[in-house]
Structure formats: structure tokens, C-alpha cells
Amino acid sequence: MFVESSAILSQDTPQRSDEPCRPMRIVHVNHAMTLGGAEMMVIDLAAEQARLGHSVSICVLGGSGPLDQKTRECGLTLVHLNAPKNLPTRVRLLTEFLRADRYDVAHGHWGVWLPTAIAARLSVTHFVLTHHGNESRRNALQHRVACALTDRVVVLTPEADVYIKRWVGVPTRKLAVIPNGIHPERIQQATRIEIEGIPPDAPVVGMIARLCPPKDYVTFLRAAEIVVRRFPSAHFVAVGGGHMQAMLEEERERMGLDRFHFLGHRLDAPSILKRLTINVLATRNEGLSITLLEAACCGRASIASDIPANRFLFEDGKAGVLTPVGDAPALAAAIELLLSDEALRKGYEERSRKRSEDFSSTQMARAYLELYATLLK
């Protein structure tokens, strides 16, 4: 599904066609198959492209990860290069890999832009990069170099973020917009689970994201501290791992929030989402959250920080509640409103479920295939 945006899309952006693309050899390149939204997007995209008749592999620059098994269960070839972090070695290994199998398209994702761009140019392979967001400015110079070697840079929403527009300066002719998609059947088939230490009838407010910046768990904790004063039966869960966990657990103890639970890394996010009363994403920037899409597919009302990607997904507040970035009292007030007004919450649940229908993995895969096809012409 290409999202028309004259401010971003070039005239070369392909239009939707019902004509099937010729079979292609595609490799998705990522830093590792860790637990995260970008990695789930890569798996869903690759699996759907394979289902549509293309030869698709995933190449990981690092070693094994927690999503390796899931990748293989989807019938995908997974290759680990086990490359060290130095650029020359990464480029050499990637170039040898791309030359050996003669891929039509190399599609880069998180943390691999420069080495994959160079390797694709050396191996005469078309290169597409999906910008998943959350990049540090210190990477901008190397990404300016990488951009010159990149055929297309895909952003996930019509409003490209400041990093892409200002710090990297990707020219409009190289930009395309393809939103993330999810596999609705996988989400709908998940069954609700109960969470240890939480009564089955207790309201649960949860956030599923890595415990590291830019995810704003501090604001979520502070909002929880406010909400439990009015709703003492409410429980809060943080699902994910990361280097901030020890600090956040210390903050929880200081606040005396015994109803705030850290569940760690989980592979059953859809089942947890179905247990939540309200889904939250407090963040300072974001590409297009897979968790928000999955929550919508589950029919859960969500509250998220008011940033461009979330505004796009929530249709400016129609399909979810937006609160100012870093504003714990505002987040708490939104949680309290949805907990106290069931009819309002049900309305958001229904609108979010309807909105999720616009973001399927099939739509996403077809859009990328159409983009590849324009390059191969």
C-alpha cells in the first residue's frame, strides 16, 4: 500500500497494479534477529514475498538470535555472517555473499545501511533500504554516504522524520512510502493468557517495547504511579528487555509500585495484548509500531505519544488516544479516562480494529515487490 504524499513521493514511485511481478531473488539484510518490531516486520515481509512466488532469504550480519527459529519455521533461508563490527570486514563478507547467489534485490533494514549499500554496489545488486526510525545523529554522515549508493529509501509514513529529511538529506526522488503490515491471521489465532500475579478480572495496562531509548518507560512508570491512586486494582506490565531494566526496576521500588510487573522478553506478544485492557506506547520517536498494529488487530484501545507516525496510524486521534511526549500526567489522565468510560474504550477498540485492516503483510509485500520491479526495469 503506497501512501500518496506529494511532499515525499517522487514521480517514479510505482502505482498499485494487479499484474503479478516476475519471480525475483530477494535477500533481506538485518543486524540480528532479536526481539523487536523491525525484526517481526522483516519476517512477515519475507514470508509473504515467498508465498507470492519469489525466492527470499534473510542475511544477518551478526550471530544467532531469539527469532532465528521463528524465521526458519516460516520456511525462510537464514544466513548468519557472524561479521565483526569493523566496516571493511562487513563489506567484504556481504559482497562475497551477494555475488555468490546473484540476488536481484538486496533489502536492508536496521543497522546495516552503509555496509549493505557498499556491498550491493560492488556486487551490482539493486539496493533498497527501509528506514525504521530511531537513528542517532552520529550516524548521519555515514548514512549520507550510504544514501548516494542506495536506489530507494522507504519510509513508513507520509511524513518522513527529521533524521531522513534534515540530517541525511535523502532526495525526494529516492523516497517512497510503504507502511508496515502485520499477519492478521497470526494475531487473531493467538489466545489470551493470564499473567502470574494478576487476578483474571483485574484491569491491565501494558507497554510492549524494548527497555531502552527512545521508548519512554520512565513516563509510563510515573503515569502508573498516578493512576493507581484512583484505580488501586489496576496492574501495569512492561514487556521487553533492555539495558534500562535495572534502572527502571529501581525506580519502581522507589515508587512502591508493587502492581507494576516486568515480564522480560516474550515471544507471545499477541496473547499478552489480548489480556490487556489498554495498550500504551510512550516513546520519543518511532517508525510505525508493529505492537500498535497488533494491538489494533486484537481490538485493543491504545494510547500513544503524539508523534507523526502515531498520528498517522491513529488518524489524528480517531483510532487511538494521543498524549504529549514525556507528559506523565496527560498519559495518566488518558488511562484513567479509558478505564472509567467503558463505552468510550469500546469505541476506540472498534475503530482501531477497523484501522488495522489497512495494514496487512500482503499489502506491504506487494508494495515492496512493485518497488523492486521499477528498479529491475
Image: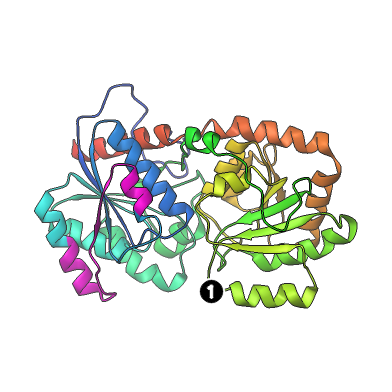
Q: Which portion, as a residue range, is magenta?
A: 69-94
- Label 1 Cα crowd, 10 Å radius (few <14 / some 14-19 / many 20+): few
Task: Give the quarter of the image for residue 256.
Answer: bottom right
Is 80 magenta? The answer is: yes
Whether residue 358 is visible, yes or no, is: yes
Extreme left residue here? 100
| Residue receiving disc 1 | 243
Looking at the rendered structure, the secondary structure element under dot 1 is loop
Kind of residue at badge 1: His
Residue drawn at x 61%, y 76% as measured from the top left: 246
Give x and y (percent) for residue 54: 23, 35
* Quadrant of the frame with the C terminus: top left
Whether residue 326 is visible, yes or no, is: no
The front one of 351 and 327 is: 351
Tell me: residue 254, above or below residue 32.
below
- Colour mode? rainbow
Is 135 magenta? The answer is: no
Q: Is residue 1 left or right of residue 12?
A: right
Residue drawn at x 48%, y 32% as measured from the top left: 185
Residue drawn at x 83%, y 51% as measured from the top left: 336
Give x and y (percent) for residue 242: 53, 69
Extreme top residue here? 18
Tell me: residue 205, above or below residue 140.
above
Tell me: residue 337, above or below residue 297.
below
* Quadrant of the frame with the N terminus: top left
